[in-house]
Structures are given as structure tokens and as C-alpha cells.
Image (tube, helix red, strand yellow):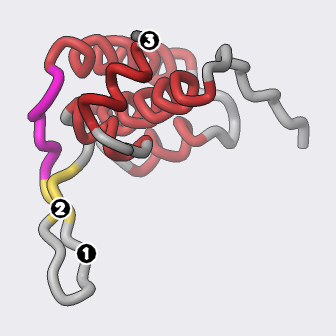
Amino acid sequence: MGMSRGLEVTLGEPEGRDFAAWLGLTPLQRSTGGKQKLGATSKMGERTLRRLLIIGSSAVVQQASKRGAPKGSWLEQMLARKPRMLVTVALANKMARIVWALLIKQENYRAPVAVRA
């Protein structure tokens, strides 16, 4: 059984957000009456994978803070307006969703092409 099939059995018919929530990388939701309320990151779920994603994203954020993120990138915009640790967890969440998409589609990662302005 492949990893994506094992995760599908564990999680049911999940999406990328469900996978990130399973890892404990999404904010707790307390929504009522059509008003969405997001709380702190749950930190519940698969501890080892979450830790590896956080370590990897913290290295990326640290290098982006020292050397500067690519101009106009999502990371540069986040670092400009949010605390570093929040950006680290947000990047780990984004990486988890990318991993999920790669597992489901059974594809290799292709780095985004830089657009010249």
C-alpha cells in the first residue's frame, strides 16, 4: 500500500487542508452562525511529520530573513506583515498541502517558474 493510499485510509476522503489539520498545522476553527473564527494552531496529530515540516520551513524563513526573499513572492509579503514564527508555520502548512497534492496526483515536484516583470 502506497503512502497516499495509507493516508487516505487513515483520513477518509481528505483534501489538502484535512491533511494539514491531521499534521496539526491549521488553526482551530470555532465557527458559528456563518461567522468564521480561527484560533491558535492545534498542534494535534502527527508529531514527527509536523516537526520536520516546521524545521524545514524555519530554515527557509531564516535564510529569507538574512538574504531577502525573492521580490514579490508570497514569502516576502508574509515576512513584511507577520511575525517570523507565524510565517514559519504558514509555510509549513503550505508545504504540507503541496506534499498532499504530489501524493494524490503521484507526480514529482516542479518548482514554480519565476515571472519577470
| Within-10-Å neighbours for mark 3: few <14, some 14–19, many 20+ | few
Choose the circle earlier in sequence order: 2 or 3.
3
Q: Which residue is mark 1?
A: 36
Q: Residue furthest bottom?
A: 33
Helix, strand or loop for disc 3: loop
Q: Which residue is mark 3?
A: 2
In the rendered structure, the answer to whether residue 111 lies left or right of residue 90 reads: right
Residue 32 visible (yes or no): yes
Report which quarter residue 5 is drawn in: top left
Alpha carbon distance from label 2 to label 1: 7 Å
Helix, strand or loop for disc 1: loop
Q: Nearer the viewer, residue 100 or 3?
A: 3
Q: Could you tell me residue 47's position as x and y percent?
A: 14, 19
Q: Residue at x 37, y 28 (%)?
A: 92
What type is the residue that disc 3 sits on? Gly
Q: Nearer the viewer, mark 2 or mark 3?
A: 3
Residue 86 visible (yes or no): no
Q: Residue at x 45, y 23 (%)?
A: 65
| Within-10-Å neighbours for mark 2: few <14, some 14–19, many 20+ | few
Report which quarter residue 113 is drawn in: top right
Q: Which residue is mark 2?
A: 29
In the rendered structure, the answer to whether residue 8 lies left or right of residue 27 reads: right
Q: Nearer the viewer, residue 42 or 74?
A: 42
Q: Could you tell me residue 43's position as x and y percent?
A: 11, 34
